[in-house]
Amino acid sequence: MDPAGYPAPNKGCLAPGKCHSGVEPIRAHDSEMARQIYDMGAKQGDPNGCVVCHGGNPKEEKEAKIAHTGAPGGSLLSEFVVHAGSVWVNEKTCGQCHREWTYAQFRSIMQTEAGKIQGALWGWGPASTGYAKKYGNYDVDDPDSTVPVFGTSIYKDYTQALMKQFPDNFPSSLVQVPATNLDNLKENPWEAIYTHVRTNSQRRHMGVKGREKRGDYRGMGCAVCHIPFNNAGLYEGGDPSVKRDEAGHAMVHSIQSSRKAKIVVNDTVYSGIPHETCVSCHNRGKRIGVSFQGLMEFPYGSPFDAKGGKQPKLHTKFYQFIQDDVHHRLKSREGNPEGGLLCQDCHTTTSMHGNGNITGTLLANVEIECSDFHGTAAYYPWELPLGWGDEFGQQVDMSNARGVAQEPLSTHKQFSTSYEAKDGYLLTARGNPFNNVVREGDKVLVHSDSGLDFEVPALKSLALTRNWKNPARAISAKIQASKHVETLECYGCHSAWAPQ
């Protein structure tokens, strides 16, 4: 094996002077994932493992057209594929090792967009389905039962109870949005909403690539999040076959995921999934991604660059920086390292990949609350009951503390970075342990996938030590507005601004 680390650096796709010599590995050569890919590839005639994800003819080293034909024996693929992470093939590629993830992802709200569709149809009279989620981007059902594929038994029971209580938010199947009947459009003008939904409105689901505009370039399926793209959609890796001035390519041929998966781009090393990856989709609708960065749409094209020109557009718009979210800021509370949190540091596996059930709203999908990390002025996170703060407004028994877990989810343990439990892993509002958030005495520690470790301010500790930034206001708010803690989301008051 040469210094580049490939088992056969001079064979097949990597033959010297041929198409892909110099391409970076999809995962670090010494990782368990890389070893499994090399072993699987060797059985299919390609020790470098390219055919495991892409198919093709591993024996052909000269003609690209021949090399990019068919698939070797033992492969689940029947033909060569370029976009190996696409939802339309990933059961046969990523799903070879991550079957539960590909199953869940196809049914996740980021693929179906059922909530957006129902909301769009709501105001169009006869097109409305009421509260029911009937349509998705594609036909889909959930044949493996109502039990989530991920999570603890507590989480699964909690989820099934929600499904019985709010069936409109947890449909068992969806059908594709119908096409507008143009012949009868004058009689049924409300059907125009179907065209809007099927074209402009729904272009951010994981079944398609991103819009070919600055900031919107991304992959499909698993590659939406796990393959890095820069804003310009330009390749910066070592594959000589990829044009450096042609937009629409991944930044490098590597998988980004957790702290243990390092990405190297032009001698810069990072880990985790940058928030820019999330913002390639989450820049419309609620604008949550750009708001997190402190950016608001601005019509005048300033501030100016060093030469007096306008800043380039991002997501087809100009932006003005106002103030970024406290979790994004480089400077945190005293004692913490410089650098912000990543979206994935708080949002869990079930929120990102889905849990295998079809969900119709974000409320049905997201299982975390601010109090899962910060607690309240009266309770540490582990002293709160399960369900506290959950959007569905259920009554909870405050004497039934959720406690902590001694083990992370088995899925986290298998594929993500492992951290010492200390005094236990904190639990989400619905009963799943965080793999990266632990208790140490009365402290809450967050291990960011960026490689940084943060202490999270626990509100009860601040109350006991009176270590508030403004003690008078804090005590007043605790006494006079205690009911707000039970009935409002934290961000209802603690968001600095939001676009309107």
Image (spheres, rainbow, N blue to C red):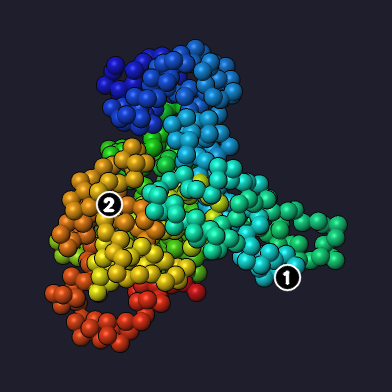
Q: Closer to the N terminus: mark 1 or mark 2? A: 1
Residue 493's place in the image compared with 92, above or below, is below
Dot 2 amino acid type = Ala
Residue 209's place in the image compared with 162, above or below, is above
Question: Residue 79, position in %: x, y?
Answer: 59, 24
Residue for point 22% across, 52% down: 424
- Tell me if mark 1 has few (under 14), some (14-19) or many (20+) residues whose alpha carbon lies within 10 angstroms of its own: few
- Using the rendered image of the protein, determine whether residue 205 is visible from the camera's viewpoint: no
Q: State the residue position of label 2.
A: 405
Q: Which of 412 and 309 is in front in this view?
A: 412
Side of 303 where 378 appears, left or right: left
Side of 7 where 18 appears, left or right: right
Q: Nearer the viewer, residue 344 or 308?
A: 344
- Tell me if mark 2 has few (under 14), some (14-19) or many (20+) residues whose alpha carbon lies within 10 angstroms of its own: many
Residue for point 40% across, 76% down: 488
Q: Quadrant of residue 372?
A: bottom left
Q: Element at badge 1? A: helix
Question: For the residues carrying marks 1 and 2, which lies nearer the camera in this image?
Answer: 2
Residue for point 31% across, 56% down: 427
Question: Residue 353, position in %: x, y?
Answer: 46, 47
Count how many numbered circles sit on residues in the image: 2
Q: Element at badge 2? A: loop
Q: State the residue position of label 1.
A: 125
Q: Nearer the viewer, residue 131 or 224?
A: 131
Question: Residue 264, position in %: x, y?
Answer: 31, 37
Residue for point 36% across, 62% down: 386
Question: Residue 459, position in %: x, y?
Answer: 23, 71
Disc number placed over residue 328 in the picture, else none: none
Q: Quadrant of residue 259?
A: top left
- Using the rendered image of the protein, determine whether residue 484 is visible from the camera's viewpoint: yes
Dot 1 amino acid type = Gly
